[in-house]
Image (cartoon, helix red, strand yellow):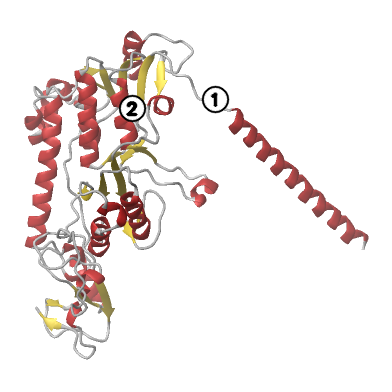
Amino acid sequence: MRFVRAIWKLLVGVKDALVLIFMLLFFGFLYAALSAKPTPVGDGILALDLNGSVVEQPSKADVSEVLSGGNRIRQYSLRELLAALEAAKTDDRVKAVALDLDGFTGGGQTTLTDLADEIRSVRASGKPVIAYATGYTDDGYQLASAASEIWLNPLGLVAVAGPGGQRLYYKGLLDKLGVTAHVYRVGTYKAAVEPYTRTDMSPEAKENAQALGNALLESWRESVVKGRPKAQLDAYMRDTNAAVQAAGGDMAKAALNAGLVDKVADRHDFEKRLAELGGEDDSAVGGYKRIRLGAYIKDAVDAQPEGPIGVVTVAGMIVDGKASAGTAGGDSIAQLIEKGLARKNLKALVVRVDSPAVRCLRLSVFARRSSKPSAASSRSSSRWAALQPRVATGCPPPPTTSTPNRRRSPDRSACSGSCPASKARSPSSGLALMASRRRRCPESPMSCAGRHRNPSNFCRPA
């Protein structure tokens, strides 16, 4: 019994010690939060150290990520960056803008185009914008091209890969395993299911991918040429190897010769240049007067702006139910739309859609919620709501009005997550996939009509 009592006393002591430590940490964090003061913003260089990606709406960190200490990629709000740059144009405290892209991981092309346009606006206001990176890829160079000066590390390069990618096809493996994939598909441009039914890309998928790639590349090129009209961009992209060989194998010098960059130097020289523009500060990192981006956003950007136009952001994957920021929950977005339409001080409501995958059914629900007559919207004939897609959804335009019709059967292709048959050319529409070892369709290729399924004979030759 003495041994058991000793063990019990030890456990109680450990418990009391843990509770005491927890209470000390809690009150310590509480005191730090209450006594914290915002970082004062003085004169200097507005430092845009983009160590992450630029998104329409940053997502919240999961509790598991916080507890595990995972290295989460940071996300920057496009709205905050645009507002900070807009304020910097007329702020006498900001002498110049430093764009450090060494840790930049990219963003959507529409997002980067908006940000590049705002950087060019700062440049046009007369304030220098200096960009630096060890190496520039497509997204990073699109932003850097809008700067007044582009600096490149002597060991770096400008690598323009263009849009594209790779895809694995599993049809050969499935055949060897004796597995038949039954795919329900409506429409011609439905390449998302091709890995299960083909060993290579179909002509329709190639046409779709080529058209999308050409459009993205041309949009990127137009954005870059706006900032670097004299750069030999087309020649460099057409034959990068020749440009490097002409520079004696020096990739940084090849970019300099092509006019893609203005200066080849290391970070130390870059920071000396910033000190010339904004003033020296030996106690600061880099030796120049720095205005940190986070402090400047808190000081100069209105976190809750008020105006006659309301904006509802739909960012991330669109799913059913409710979801936090960064993932668009259908019910959450619908409630925000209804809340916006009910506000008397709003003249219009804009729904900005920035999603890599949009369910047509859920998108149509958004539109119906936006155009749904309500007491608030009926008071003023000038109130309206509009969908503003930031990326191509591949879905046909949703109806703006709905007429009850009980005899009309629902569109089951939309219920299953795929768009109705059209030339929207969506390579990532919804699908229903079944794998079976026992039953094979008599002919191949085959297509299954999801809306007219018969349990006894659901497969038919294409």
Please state which amino acid type lies under the numbered disc 1.
Lys
- Residue at the extreme front: 379
- Where is 221 relative to 11, above or below? above
Look at the image and tell me in which quarter the C terminus lies.
Answer: bottom left
* Residue 26 visible in the displayed image: yes
**Residue beneath disc 1:** 37
Residue 329 pos. (x, y %): 36, 57
Residue at left offset 12%, top offset 39%: 219
Indicate which disc, 1 or 2, sits on the residue closer to the N terminus.
1
Residue 343 or 246: which is nearer the viewer?
343
Label 2: which secondary element: helix
- Where is 322 relative to 69, above or below? below
- Where is 228 relative to 64, above or below? above
Question: Which image quarter: residue 406?
Answer: bottom left
**Residue beneath disc 2:** 84
Residue at left offset 14%, top offset 33%: 223
Q: Residues within 10 Å of mark 2 (few under 14, many from 20)?
A: many
Residue 152 or 139: which is nearer the viewer?
139
